[in-house]
Image (cartoon, rainbow, N blue to C red):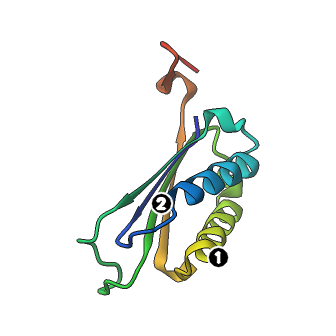
Amino acid sequence: MPVLKVLSNESFLNTDELLKKSSKLLSEILGKPEKYVMVSFEENPDMIFGGSDDPFFYLELKSIGLPRSRTKEISKRLSEFLSHETGIPVSRMYIEFSDAEASMWGWNGSTF
């Protein structure tokens, strides 16, 4: 049920490893089984942030029961992780959080 979409203007050589590490981290941060975690990385070189084409990330994190009280902590952990893995500074990242209602999230032919 947690979905993390990562968009960047930069290409990454080892996306497979980054996807796996991101999935594991998100599972740990949210306390949700990794079997429900979905992560995607997309590249769009035709983007700028702050008037610059220096590498950056835009993240969307959506999950059922996403706690508003923890978004600051989650932002810190995700951005520091991505910065460590890629060298992109945390100041070049935006994260959009969305809390989804269980009845509005379909899976396995039903909803949660």
- Against 5, residue 111 (above or below) is above
User: Residue farthest to the top?
Assistant: 109
User: Mark 2 and 1 residues: CB-CB less than 8 Å, in contact?
Assistant: no
Q: Residue at x 47, y 79 (%)?
A: 92
Q: Which residue is mark 1?
A: 84
| Closest to the observer, 65 or 83 | 83
Q: Which residue is mark 2?
A: 59
Q: Within 10 Å of the Cα at label 2, are there few (<14), some (14-19), or many (20+) other Cα atoms?
A: many
In screen coordinates, is 35 left or right of 5?
A: right
Q: Residue at x 47, y 69 (%)?
A: 94
Numbered disc in front, either 2 or 1: 1
Tag 1: residue type?
His
In screen coordinates, is 40 left or right of 79?
A: left
- Against 109, residue 62 (above or below) is below
Mark 2–mark 1 distance (CA, rounded to whole Å): 16 Å
- Against 61, residue 85 (above or below) is below
Can you give x and y, in whole percent of width and height, for residue 15 in the image? 50, 60
On the rendered image, what quadrant is the N terminus found in? top right
Can you give x and y, in whole percent of width and height, for residue 102 in the image? 57, 26
Tag 2: residue type?
Leu
